[in-house]
Image (cartoon, rainbow, N blue to C red):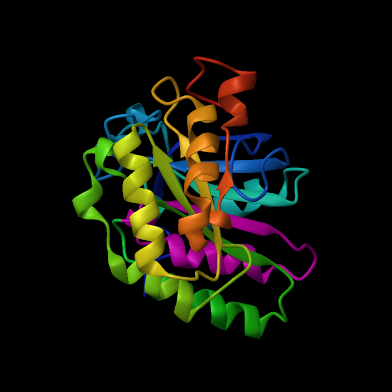
Amino acid sequence: MVSSEQRMPIAERFVSINGEGLRAGQLSAFIRFAGCSLACSYCDTAWARDPFAGSEQLSVEELVDWAFSRPVRNITLTGGEPLEQPLLPQLVERLVACPERALAIEIETNGACDISALAALRQQLHDRVDGQSSVGFTLDWKMPSSGMADAMLPSNIEALRRWPSAADSLKLVCGTEEDLLFAMDLLDEAGPLPCAVLLSPVAGALDPAAIAAFMAEHAAHSETLRGARLQLQLHKILWPGQEKGV
C-alpha cells in the first residue's frame, strides 16, 4: 500500500478551457504532473518533462481538495506524463468516489505507458459508484515526426477495446505528409475502434487545411479515416505562444 503521506510532483495547476479533446471548449481544472520519459520533437510543454520542474509536492488528498474546490465539471490530468506517477490510481479513485459531485476526468497519456491496469480499475470504479463520474483516456499515439513512434505500446489500443468507454479518444498529432499516411495505415490496421479518433496538426508545422484535404482525398479507401475528427488546439489560438496556465 502506498502511504498517504507520499506526494506527487506538480508542475502547475489551474483552471482554463480545455483546448482539445472530447470536451474542447469546456472549463476544466488542470493538474499537470512533472516528469516524462519521452522527448517529442514538437513538445509544447518540454519544461514539464523535468521531474523536478514542479514547485509543489502534493498529496492525493491535497489534490482532491483543490480539484473539488474549483467550480468546474471536468478534471484534466496531464503532464509531463500522469501514468509515470505511482499514486495516480489512488488519485483517480478518490476523484471518482465523491458521492456529492460527478466529474468528467480526462487522463492525457503519451502512448508509451501501459494503461491496462488503470483501464481495469476504471471499470471497477464505474461499477462500484454506479457510473456517477466518467474517466476517459486521451491516448496520444506518436507519429514518426515526433521521434517517439517506436515507443508506442500496441497493447494500449487493445486495452481501449477490452475496457471501452465513450470518454476515450485516440489522438494522432501529425506534422508531415508522412505522419498522415502513417496515421491512416495505423487506423486501417487497427480496424474499428471503440473510441473517438482525433487528427491534430503540429502547430506551425502542418496546415490544418492539409489534414482536411487528406481526409477528404482518402476517405473512400479508408473506413476508419472516415470516422476521424480534425482537431485544432483552441488554447494555441486563444493564447498564442503561452506555455503555462492554458
- Residue for point 51% across, 17% down: 242
In this view, the residue farthest toward the top is 241
- Residue for point 71% across, 59% down: 103
Q: Is residue 130 above or below residue 240?
A: below
Task: Magenta stretch: give its range.
Answer: 83-111
- Residue for point 21% across, 39% down: 147
The number of callouts visible is 0
* Foreground pick, 120 / 174: 174
The quadrant in which the N terminus is found is bottom left
Position of 127 with respect to 215 (left or right) is right
Position of 170 with respect to 130 (left or right) is left
The image quadrant that residue 100 belongs to is: bottom right
Q: Residue 150 magenta-drawn?
A: no
From this viewpoint, is residue 142 visible? Answer: no
Q: Looking at the picture, how far across and down is residue 43, in whole percent?
A: 35, 31
From this viewpoint, is residue 54 visible? Answer: yes
The quadrant in which the C terminus is found is top right
Q: Is residue 132 above or below residue 54?
A: below
Q: Is residue 15 above or below residue 112?
A: above
Q: Is residue 245 above or below residue 188?
A: above
* Foreground pick, 147 / 77: 147
The image quadrant that residue 114 belongs to is: bottom left
The image quadrant that residue 96 belongs to is: bottom right
Q: Looking at the picture, how far across and down is residue 244, in whole percent?
A: 50, 24
Q: Residue 107 magenta-drawn?
A: yes
* Foreground pick, 190 / 115: 190
Q: Looking at the picture, how far across and down is residue 35, in whole percent?
A: 31, 42
